[in-house]
Amino acid sequence: MDAQECGAAAAPEPPARGCVAAWGDMVQRNLRSLPHSCSTLGRKIAALYDSFTSKSLKEHIFPPLMEMLIYFNFFKAPCLVDLKKPESKIPHTVNFYIRAEPGVMLGVWHVVPSCRGEDAKGKDRCWYEAALRDGNPIIVYLHGSAQHRAASHRLRLAKVLSDGGFHVLCVDYRGFGDSTGKPTEEGLTVDAICIYEWTKARSGTTPVCLWGHSLGTGVATNAARVLEEKGCPVDAIVLEAPFTNMWTASINYPLLKIYQKLPGFLRILMDALRKDKIVFPNDENVKFLSSPLLILHGEDDGTVPLECGKQLYEIAYNAYRNKERVKMVIFPPGFKHNLLCKNPTLLITVRDFLSKQWA
């Protein structure tokens, strides 16, 4: 009796002769390619080894170390903050993200003026975006190194400006907070231009000011110079605690001062900055600007000495054709590097300057 007639499973048929032959050919090709693959891998390993051994140990260590110290973006404090829910830290605020370039998404908090706080309750991002056209001036805030947009001193400034009738857009650069990407000088400049142009496209005739603090002053002047060269000068610039360039900022950095007497340290520092292409040349950038420029500095700033702000003001004042567009205000001791916002005259100073320039 036939096996199939009894209900038993039929034995599998042998694979077709053509399939076996094709499989055999594929195996042979892979075997033949093994020596070539090994040779390619060997060349790559040798190239990496040559690249590593051709540099001294300090060349491997100092550039990434300087990058870490300047941006300090790995320090993501405060830690227990949900950046997607800003109203737990500051009222009438919405969180959103914009794409600066492929692979880079920037986290942004938009704080509306306090006078519109009641209107903002329960509103979505679209309402906040439309509110940029309400005629209240807009600040794009570019923060300093370390932490993120929820840092306490940044929230304090945003509240002061909001109470003073400003929209405030607080952006975390790439690699900071929950923004993706890795920080570089060029990348941070792209981020600042992106958020400024995004805001201008939605603000109608409402003016937009770039406000940079500390490291952010270098980002602000870099972005302003690029926009100036494109024929789109920034509506206004505020530089809080600015340095002249990253070289002078680095040698005055408290953490690095203790090493300056070590033989060859300054040369190593300069080489590391050059390798990382970290310049942030405020002193050169201001020579090419025409936007209203307000410089704010505290007498007791121990991170960026007041002298740096004074030097930058002198350079800008001498370079500007319209001298009335450049102003510096020095704040008395008590506010150090991060807390000029605690001075009750800060808001008045900023509003008076911008109102005069935008009249």
Image (cartoon, rainbow, N blue to C red):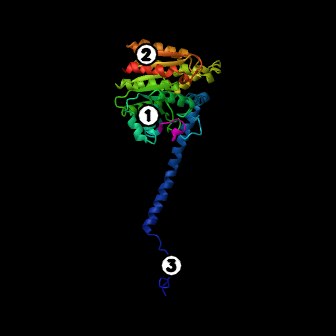
Q: Residue at label 1? A: 116
First in sequence: mark 2 or mark 1?
1
Asked if 83 appears above or below 1 in the picture, the reply is above
Can you tell which of label 2 and label 1 is closer to the viewer? 1
Q: For residue 89: magenta?
A: yes
- In the foreground, 31 or 282: 282
- Residue under label 3: 9
Q: Which residues are magenta?
A: 83-94
Q: Position of residue 189 (x, y in %)?
A: 45, 29
Give coordinates of residue 197: x percent, y percent: 39, 31
Tell me the number on the disc at residue 326: 2
Tag 2 and tag 1, C-beta contact below 8 Å: no
Mark closest to the chain's N terminus, 2 or 3: 3
Residue neighbourhood size for the residue with mark 1, other residues' Cα within 10 Å, grouped as few (<14), some (14–19), many (≥20): some
Q: Residue 249: x, y in percent?
A: 55, 21
Q: Amino acid at mark 2?
A: Val
Mark 1 against mark 3, which lies toward the viewer?
1
